[in-house]
Image: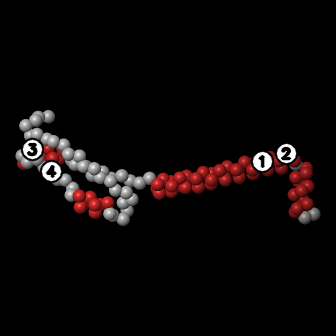
Amino acid sequence: MNIIARAILSCKRNRMKTLALLLLLTISSSVFFVTISSNLATRATLRNLDANVHNVVMITYDINRAFEILEETGVWFEDWIELETLRKIGELPYVRSFDYSIAKRMWNPSLKH
């Protein structure tokens, strides 16, 4: 008797064991494929986020440092970035979009906090 005939005979004699084995194989393969599918979906989501979400950089004026310099030297420190420097930053190859705004505040040295 060859091996295929033995396997068929064993399946006919032990139907419940065969069904249990088939059910176990089906469930374990389903879990395996769900795991692989969720892993691939997670990687695709991360790739899409990296491609579509861009970083934002803000250059701000440090008012606290300006007050420290005022207390040390008695001179109000205004170090604004020149427009040409801002344009050079915007023309860098890894900058996708560029926008700037400048706000000016008035300050009177006779006023106290």
Q: Position of residue 28 (x, y in %)?
A: 70, 50
Q: What residue type is disc 1 on?
A: Leu
Label at residue 23: 1
Quarter occupied by the N terminus = bottom right
Q: Is residue 11 found left or right of 95 in the rendered image? A: right
User: In the depicted view, which residue is nearer to us: 94 or 73?
Assistant: 94
- In space, the residues marked 2 and 3 are separated at their CA atoms by 89 Å
Q: Position of residue 17 (x, y in %)?
A: 83, 47
User: What element does badge 3 sit on?
Assistant: helix
Residue at horizontal 19 percent and vertical 53 percent from the top: 80
Q: How many marks?
A: 4
The answer to which image quadrant residue 63 occupies is top left
- What residue is shown with label 2? 16
- What residue is shown with label 4? 78
Q: Position of residue 75 (x, y in %)?
A: 8, 48
Q: What residue type is disc 4 on?
A: Glu
Mark 4 or mark 3: whose residue is earlier in sequence: 3
Mark 4 or mark 1: whose residue is earlier in sequence: 1
- The answer to whether one can see residue 72 in this image is no
Callout 1: 10 Å neighbours few (<14), some, many (20+)?
few
Mark 2 or mark 3: whose residue is earlier in sequence: 2
User: In the depicted view, which residue is nearer to us: 93 or 105?
Assistant: 105
Q: Is residue 67 found left or right of 91 in the rendered image? A: left
